[in-house]
Image (cartoon, helix red, strand yellow):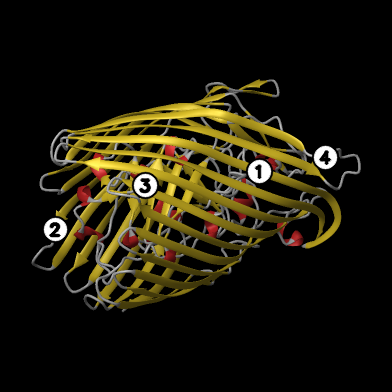
Amino acid sequence: MLLFSQRSDSARLVPVTDTVLPEVAVQAFQSNLQWKAVPAAVALLGRNELARYGSASLVPVMNMVPGIRIEERSPASYRLSIRGSLLRSPFGVRNVKIYWNSIPLTDGGGNTYLNLVDQTQLTAVEIIKGPAASIYGAGTGGAVLLRSDPAYTRQKEHRFTSGILGGSYGLFQQHLGWEYSNARITSSLQQSHQQADGYREQSASRKDMVKWQFSWQTARQQIRFMAWYTDLYYQTPGGITLAQMQLNPKLARQPAGSLPGAVQQKTAIYNKTLLAAIQQEIRLGEQWTWKNFLSGHHSSIANPFITNYEKRAEANLGAGSQLVYSISNAVFRFQWINGAEYLHNHSLIDNFGNRSGNADTVQFRDDIYAVQWFAFSQAQLSLADKWVLTAGVSINNSSYRYQRTSDPASTGFVRKKISGVVTPRLAIAYRVSKAVSVYLLAAKGFSPPALAEVRPSDGNYYGNLEAEYGWNIEAGIKGATADNRWQFDVAAYFFRLQNAIVRRTNAIGAEYFVNAGSTRQNGLETWLKYRVIKEGKRLVRDWNLWSSFSYQPYRFEEYQQSGSNYSGKNLTGVPRTIWVTGMDIEIRNGVYLNTSVNATGSLPLTDKNDVLAEAYQLVQLKLGYRTGQKKQQLDWFIGVDNLLNQRYSLGNDINALGKRYYNPAPGRNVFAGVRYRF
């Protein structure tokens, strides 16, 4: 449960060490409480943390957080896991709900294209770990809240940002931004471009994004609008064997038997997505607030793969409403939220043969509708600035309608429905002292199979897949001591997952999914920060040491597959330990240094646990120089990733056919850039 922050002064880029961390308020569960008072495992990454290693990838930033593992099988291909395995995520993000400025990016099919988001356009990322239940609906992993709202200002202000970054393997990134604000209006227009040749064969990428945000407020009403368009292209090199990685880690997937390789088939993902959303917030009186949103987005996707060429057209609609009652006095604060959220996805999926990167003969044409909706109620009571009690519950529903339109014998849509699943959440926090709190919570999580699991890349329909569910029991302590010099966050959790969904591959390497019994996912997370020097008067202005540690001895509890009993085996794809530690120093003349070591333990690549990915240690550093004050600032920087030149796989293909488990990450590489804000 890591927490970083930034100052609200948007006209100045300031070091993160200026913020007194325990006083930061978080938005998780709409609590608007100080971080230490929230009865939940919550982490916040601010603007400075998002740019800590550069701005080309979310991977090193997110992996600073204990309990979080984000992988990148190829550039721009993210997989995100919160306190769990990546069994369900051969690509993309599943089992985690993601919002951007309270607008769901997760679609009705349960999938989220996190790689469409550009890191330079975010101001903060808030991570809720463990089943969020109630207010966020389905999901056993947790929720991620992306933020980019510009702030209102008393006077009219225009602010401009620009940046450029370059690095090894053809990396190039540039971004431009303009913001306008006054007491009633904010407007933000941002553009970004990123491209790279890639470390491996068939691993080039390119992403272009444009985003506009607008908000308008009166004494009792606020209206916000957001629209963005992303054109994303990235090649997919595919997995290779251990012998191939040791011989030449830059290889893409090689031909095998009758199957061609990734280079021959020009394997890649093309994704063009347009999203627009509008939000309204109205104060109905002193105690009542009504919040509504309506969103829509369309994705056009093409995916030449080894065995086929898939084209998808996805139309998504989202809507939600919340009625909030709040009252407070000198003794207590009470908030009661009731609401509902509806997500609708319509996908037209066509599979063709792949002839050297060109769509060939039609194999399948499918028409699928996926719907998720939930209604919830949550109450929060704060007493005497000592106790915080939260109780919430949601009723979750999901359904699919599937038809193979290319099949002349089709008799219409096949339907699958999961309805009436109740997921409660109870939590309590007690402030031991002014700066330290303890909490205890119990929450049930529920996660229906995603569209990409019901209809995976092997082209078949798996209507027999059941939803995952389970209870999470958790206790934690967080806060600060010694005048905020020591800051800490410790949590222990006990999670038992039923009907775990795991990935399988068929004889030609296409994937499908099955339910695999139950898992036991108990763990421990710690985060510690020590301020050696705070606002020093001499050479060193700020000097911080920090460390995060995740202990994840996850196991299959009951799991039998094809006559084999894997009960008691370590959970596939999960390292038992991850330790990340770092140091941040800022000199009074503007020079700063960020450095860290990520030590990730070995992890099983098969359910049988007979193949392990080796442990690795990543050393990363960034040296920079900031000039300017207040409204103008220039930031020059240079950095090194994988300083020790470790050979490792950042994104493994678990249970892979032909033992092609490995997607090698780059060796030692460098980057440099400049950002200007005025």
Disc 4 to disc 3, C-alpha distance: 47 Å
State the residue position of label 1: 370
Query: How far is disc 1 from disc 2 in space, using C-alphas?
Result: 52 Å
**How many residues crowd mark 3 within 10 Å: few (<14), some (14–19), many (20+)?**
many
Q: Is residue 639 left or right of residue 206?
A: left
Could you tell me which secondary element the residue under label 3 belongs to?
loop
Disc 4 crowd, CA 10 A, few/some/many (<14, 14-19, 20+)? few
Q: Secondary structure at mark 4?
A: loop
Label 1 element class: strand
Q: Position of residue 115 (x, y in %)?
A: 54, 57
In this picture, residue 542 sits left or right of residue 196: left
Q: Earlier in the sequence, mark 1 or mark 2?
A: 1
Q: CA distance from mark 1 to mark 3?
A: 32 Å
* N-terminal label among 1 and 4: 1
Q: Quadrant of residue 587?
A: bottom left
- Residue with the mark numbered 2: 534
Give, as a three-letter code, the residue at label 3. Val
Closer-to-camera residue (115/563)? 115
Q: Amino acid at mark 1?
A: Ala
Q: Position of residue 588 (x, y in %)?
A: 16, 70
Residue 599 is left or right of residue 467, and the answer is: left
Residue located beneath label 3 in the image? 65
* Residue that extends furthest to the left in the rendered view of this protein: 537
The amino acid marked with disc number 4 is: Gly
Which of discs 4 and 3 lies nearer the camera? The answer is 4
Q: Residue at x 22, y 62 (%)?
A: 585
Residue at image location 34% in from the left, 72% down from the top: 637
**Residue 573 at x, y = what percent?**
53, 38
Location of residue 151 (image quadrant):
bottom left
The answer to which of marks 4 and 3 sits earlier in the sequence is 3
Tag 4 residue = 412
Amino acid type shown at disc 2: Lys
